[in-house]
Amino acid sequence: MPRINLLPWRDELRTRRRNQFFIGLGAAVGAAGLVILASNFVMNGVISSQKARNKLLEDEIALLDERIAEILDLEAKKERLMARMEIIEQLQRSRPEIVHVFEELVRTLPDGVRLTAVKQSGKRVEIRGDAESNTRVSAFMRNLDKSEWFTQPDLEIVEVREAGAKSKKGVPQETGEFAGRSSQFVVYANQVSVTDDEEVAK
């Protein structure tokens, strides 16, 4: 019976299988590398796209911030203009008031009384003058109390002095038309404005 040597065939089979294994392993490694490269490429594309979106959003947010700042600036300018318009309207309404004040002072001034100074601070009016007697000052106070343009008259100072005498309370001495003794006074009153009349009418 002849003897058959199977060793070369087995070695060839082993070599072929080993080569197939390495080829398969190489193919798997190559496929894995391709998958990794493709995934990396895709991820880089996604990241780049997201960065572009973020940049667009940041630019839009910056533009909106600029518009909001412009709107706030316009609102501030509007408020300033409205305040100026209100002041101008008040001045327009109160412009004839000074005429009424002086007209009312003349109308309420009794005989024997003369005014030496009139000073206004806001609605507060300071009236200085002298009179022949305290009775004349009282009459002037009553006229102011009945006036439509003055309220709450308050007699601050009244001094009876001889001509040329010095004031004890700071009222300046006036060389007036009243010879001998005179009553020098300081009266405060509140002016009634047009806006006050409108509020009362409402």
Image: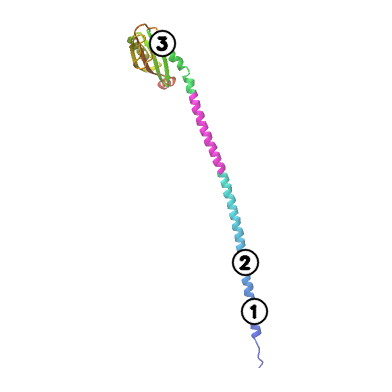
Q: Residue furthest bottom?
A: 1
Residue at 64% across, 80% down: 13
Badge number at residue 40: none
Q: Which residue is mark 2?
A: 31
Q: Secondary structure at mark 3?
A: helix
Mark-to-mark CA distance, 1 and 3: 135 Å
Magenta-tinted stretch: 62-88
Residue 116, image x, y percentages: 41, 12
Q: Secondary structure at mark 1?
A: helix
Which quadrant does the N terminus fall into?
A: bottom right
- The disc, 3 or 2, on the residue closer to the chain's N-terminal end is 2
Coloring scheme used: rainbow
Q: Which residue is mark 1?
A: 15
Residue 146, image x, y percentages: 36, 14
Q: Which residue is mark 3?
A: 107
Q: Nearer the viewer, residue 119 or 96?
A: 119
Vertical position of residue 63 compared to residue 20: above or below: above
Sort mark 3 into few (<14), some (14-19) or many (20+) by Cα contacts within 10 Å: few
Q: Nearer the viewer, residue 200 or 69?
A: 69
Mark-to-mark CA distance, 1 and 2: 24 Å
In the displayed structure, does residue 39 sit left or right of residue 171?
right
Foreground: disc 1 or disc 3: 3
Magenta segment's dominant SS is: helix
Residue at 62% across, 72% down: 24
